[in-house]
Amino acid sequence: MYITKSGQVKAFEVPHNHVQAQKNISITTQDLNNLSVPALIIHGKEDYIALPIHARINAKSMPHSELILIPEMGHMFFNRNLERQLVDYIVAHMSKYGKGKN
């Protein structure tokens, strides 16, 4: 939700390109269940475009997944502290599962 310049409270409208992109997605829960590679899912707890419940459903559908829900992050991130945190999560995941691990 957001407040317009005139003070009106509005629900967040999903951008048209997201709606169009979703029409062409044909991945099923079974497809996700068949993945054999480790997946890192990073999702904002305050994402009102792709709700966190969908990240949870996707994570439960992937047998080798790790879900990280970031407090106070929406659909996008715009601060350096959060950027560093995301890099740390990705590097840790790659260190755990990346190429060259014995």
Image (cartoon, helix red, strand yellow):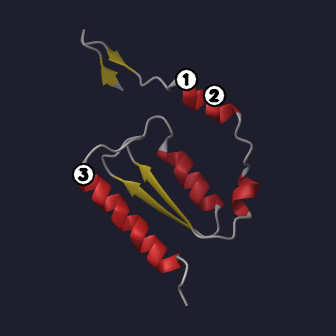
The spot of residue 31 in percent (x, y) is: 74, 56
* Count of numbered labels shown in the rendering: 3
Name the side, left or right, on which 42 lies relative to 28: left
- Residue under label 2: 20
Q: Position of residue 68 (x, y in %)?
A: 43, 60
Query: Looking at the image, is 17 positioned above or below residue 91?
Result: above
Please tell me which residue lies in front, 30 or 93.
93
Please state which amino acid type lies under the numbered disc 3.
Arg
In front here: 100 or 15?
A: 100
The reply to whether dot 1 and dot 3 touch (C-beta < 8 Å) is no
Q: What amino acid is at disc 2? A: Gln
Q: Label 1 crowding class (10 Å Cα cut-off): few <14, some 14-19, many 20+?
A: few
In the image, what residue type sits under mark 1?
His
Q: Residue at x 31, y 61 (%)?
A: 85
> Residue 2, position in %: x, y?
32, 24
Q: Secondary structure at mark 2?
A: helix
Q: Is residue 62 left or right of residue 76?
A: right
**Mark 1 touching mark 2, by CB under 8 A?**
yes
Residue density around tag 2, few if under 14, some if 14–19, many if 20 or more, within 10 Å:
few
Circle 1 residue: 16
Q: CA distance from mark 1 to mark 3?
A: 28 Å
Q: Residue at x 60, y 60 (%)?
A: 60
Q: Quadrant of the C terminus?
A: bottom right
Which residue matches tag 3?
80
Which residue is pictured at 42% across the width and 65% down the height?
A: 90
